[in-house]
Image (cartoon, grey):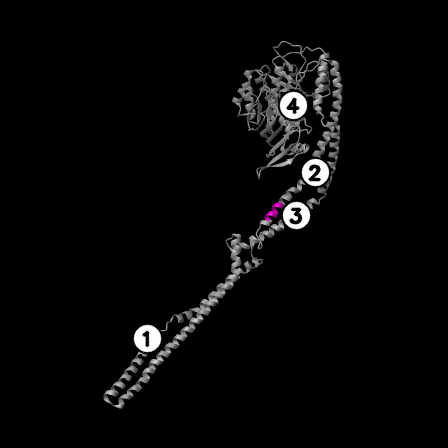
Amino acid sequence: MHFVEVAIQNVRGFSPAGRFPLKSGYLILKPPTADVLPLANVALSLLFADGRGGDSSLVGSAGRSGKAALTFVGQDGMTYRILRELGGSGSLHRLNPATSQPELVSTDVSEINQYLRGQAGLPPRTTFEQVYCLQLVMLPSRRPRKSVAKAAAAAGAKASGATPSLAAASQVAPAEDVPAAEAKVKVLQKELVTAKEVDQLQFKVDELASLIFEADSKLKGGEGLKEAISRAEAAWRAAPSPESMGLPLDILTRVKRYPKAVARRDEALARLETDREPEQEDASLKVPPLTENRFFWGGLGAGVLFMGLSVGLGIVAAQPMWRYLALINIPAFGTAAWMALRYVDDLQHATRKGSKDNRKDARQKKILDEFELEDAPVRMAIKALNLESHTEIPAALEQKDLLGIRLGELQTQLEEYESSPEFQAAIRDGQELRAQQETLNAELTAKGTYVRDLREVERELSRLKESIALAKAPPVQVAAAPGQTPVPVDPLEDPSPLVLSQAADVLTTDILSVQALLKDRCVQYLTALTDRRYQGVEWDREGNAFLLTQNSRVPVGELSPKDIDLYYLALRLTVVEKTCARVKRPFLLDDVLTGVDEAKLPLVARMLKHLGTLTQVLHVTAHPGFGQMSDGTVNV
């Protein structure tokens, strides 16, 4: 998990408006002013909204609305964007990897929190705050000291095995007006009762939201089938069919008989060509012209010759006998006439053969026309379906029937799923749970439009009681750190039990195993930060810490503020390093190093640089030395 971008508008400590990309590694965030940049508070308000407007305190300029958005990659690898109007409503979006477009997940606070826990892999708020956020108010030196009465209460809690609480507050001063403070304690106690009631109601609402989410998840089990049906229906509609492609309805029947039609055509054409071959040979014989017939010219020449002789000799000789020569013209002209008649007969015979050839051409055309009736639809189908051969047509057209069968199967599965007892029970449970949720929301509304958070009231009440106790009780002489003069101060609270217990939750193990896992690395950080003034650390069964020197074993609560802050920093860096080896989450670090010696800042920067190789580290600071060691700088 890592943050990708933070976008703000009128948020305290940030620029008036902007979008700031966040890359992996060790990243420095430089605030625009000297004001504290509440990066951790903004992230907590977005990721763990309470729905009661508690984040309105982050608004920058009064009278204007503030907005904040955070884009991050969850443990499931999906990109999420949560957008919230500070003090108002919000929404969660998820990036669709197929379309690269954001999709709305929910606008309900409880459902968003449940979804982020179940899908995106967010830990509980306390774990995220105490393990992955390091704020200035978390430093032990900034927490209230134990008064005598509080030390006795802590001793009783230790005897009972309870884990001491950490109150995030600034240094508590003795109360100036004890009676007024005690009166305010009574008011806060009444408010605490109301806050507890609201907290219990909110817990029930959150529980109902979780149950509603589970019921909705069961109802959403059919979403996959619905999407599959939608895709199958779209594929079925897009599949080719004779109607959609403009083909004859019996195209499949035509395709089946197409090979027979081709065979019939080829057979008919072959038979026609066989019958035509001898006729083509006869037709190839030409009828010689009459002018080339020598018998015709011989008979015609002989007739003319004898006709001329009979006339000429009859006149010259004046003899009637020469006239009989003209009778020879009869057989001569008869031969010529017979040759002419034979030529005409040959021409008629050749003309009859040409007519027969024309009939055979017409038969061939008829055969091809009949085949065209079968061939044209098949060729049209091949072109429309963009295929190579007619054998592929049945498979292409049968696809629609197969998709229709698949669509029917999916619709049947959906009907069976929606009629199942589990689905119907989820519908009834969802309706009942929503009715209970509306009732509880009405009760919450009746309690008041705005009720402070239970922990906030408890912290204020605790601080007020401590201030009263400080005003009434004298300070206690406490042992100081080695090499320092004892100072009459109250002991500080040991932060170890809460940190170790949260680390045990993240690593899903017990607190003793966590101590064994953290000890060596914590000692390395501690000796480096304290110039080897402490050579070891030990924890008891409750998680209370003791630092080891050459000659003593000092409880952490009795250390000087400077040393206990260094120990706390070493412990927190160790916990982040070990937990991020199991599950990666960003580490948000406010400018908590203001009290650290300048000579140690490069060492701390190298430590944070090392953590940046394991997970995303976002360090809010304006110190120029850290920017030189970081992987990047963002001006926010």
Residue bounds of the magenta highlight: 230-235
Residue 290 in sight from this viewpoint: yes
Amino acid found under the numbered disc labelled 2? Ala
Q: Residues within 10 Å of mark 1 (few under 14, many from 20)?
A: few
Which mark is first along the chain, 1 or 4? 1
- Direction front: furthest residue: 63
Q: Is residue 322 magenta?
A: no
Q: Residues within 10 Å of mark 2 (few under 14, many from 20)?
A: many
Residue 2 lies in quadrant: top right
Q: Which mark is residue 500?
A: 4
Q: Where residue 316 sits in the image (x, y, percent)?
A: 23, 87
Q: Which mark is residue 411?
A: 3
Residue 597 lies in quadrant: top right
The alpha-carbon separation of the residues under discs 2 and 4 comes to 35 Å
| Image: 278 above or below 41 | below
Q: Which mark is residue 291?
A: 1
The alpha-carbon separation of the residues under discs 3 and 4 comes to 53 Å
